[in-house]
Amino acid sequence: METLTTTLAETLTEIKAHGTKAKPINTRTLASRLDFELFDDHELETLMVSVGNFIHDIRGGLSPTTNRTGRGRWLTMLGTSGTGKTYVARKLWERWKTKWCEFMPDHGVLQRRRGYWGSWPKMIERMRSGDYSDSLQIQEADFVVIDEIGATRDPTGFAKDQLFQLTDRLIGKWAVLTGNVTMRQLGDFDTRIPSRIIRDDNECVQVNTVDYALRGVK
Ligand SMILES: Nc1ncnc2c1ncn2[C@@H]1O[C@H](COP(=O)(O)OP(=O)(O)OP(=O)(O)O)[C@@H](O)[C@H]1O
Ligand SMILES: [Mg+2]
């Protein structure tokens, strides 16, 4: 009975939290909070809209009192070099580590959900040497960031198989992916990869614009 009451209380708290929390975030406010310059560039504004939607959803999904995370979805940022994809991913990772991973059960001891950050080329290097510890960590994580998907030499097709398996493992988790590749190139690795990247509520935003380093910002 106690368990049932506790579960009910938790569920109600979650519903209440979901109903009251996280309004969609204003793009300019968000950009300024993330120290992300927009340059009146439509591509960068579109990126911020997708990031805002993702933040809205993850905050709505995470229970403040239990380890429940809701059904996660992915934000994939693809595009040309120096457009802030990794920069934004890092900001989201910081938020995870300092805020989103935390939950406080009724008995009051702060707990942390697990997260994972990985750079795809380095992960592939480790896997090639027989070290699959990243996969285990991903399996246990509720929030996963993978930087630079697709960016690796792949003469044997090993990396493309691993990329597909990675997408399998990420289903239902909150995930942020970045890549300097196009959807078409991901499709050349495996046609199922682009499909998963946009499946269900997953979102892929493509940022093809001027490299930050070439904008003349000091
Ligand atoms: N819109 C932006 N506002 C502020 N700083 C930015 C912005 N875009 C990029 N930067 C700066 O430029 C650096 C390079 O950007 P970043 O590494 O995020 O590029 P990227 O899109 O991941 O490129 P690549 O595809 O080559 O990995 C960042 O560390 C950050 O300092
Ligand atoms: Mg990058």
Image (cartoon, helix red, strand yellow):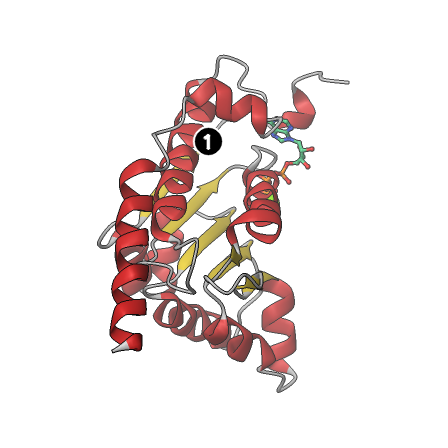
Secondary structure, mark 1, is loop
Question: Looking at the image, which residue sits at the far bottom?
Answer: 130
Q: Residue at x 54, y 40 (%)?
A: 85
Question: Looking at the image, which residue sits at the far left?
Answer: 200
| Residue 87 located left or right of residue 77 | right
Question: Residue 102: image x %, image y %?
Answer: 54, 56
- Image quadrant assignment for residue 55: top left
Query: Visible in this render: residue 119?
Result: no
Count of labels shown? 1
The residue identified by callout 1 is 208
Q: Is residue 170 above or below residue 56?
A: below
- In this view of the protein, which residue sits in the foreground, 201 or 16? 16
Question: Residue 14: image x %, image y %?
Answer: 31, 53
Amino acid of disc 1: Asn
Question: Looking at the image, which residue sits at the far right?
Answer: 218
Q: Residue at x 39, y 53 (%)?
A: 62
Query: Visible in this render: residue 56?
Result: yes
- Ligand 2 falls in which quarter? top right
Q: Is residue 28 above or below residue 95?
A: above
Q: Quadrant of the image for the N terminus?
A: bottom left
Q: Residue at x 51, y 50 (%)?
A: 100
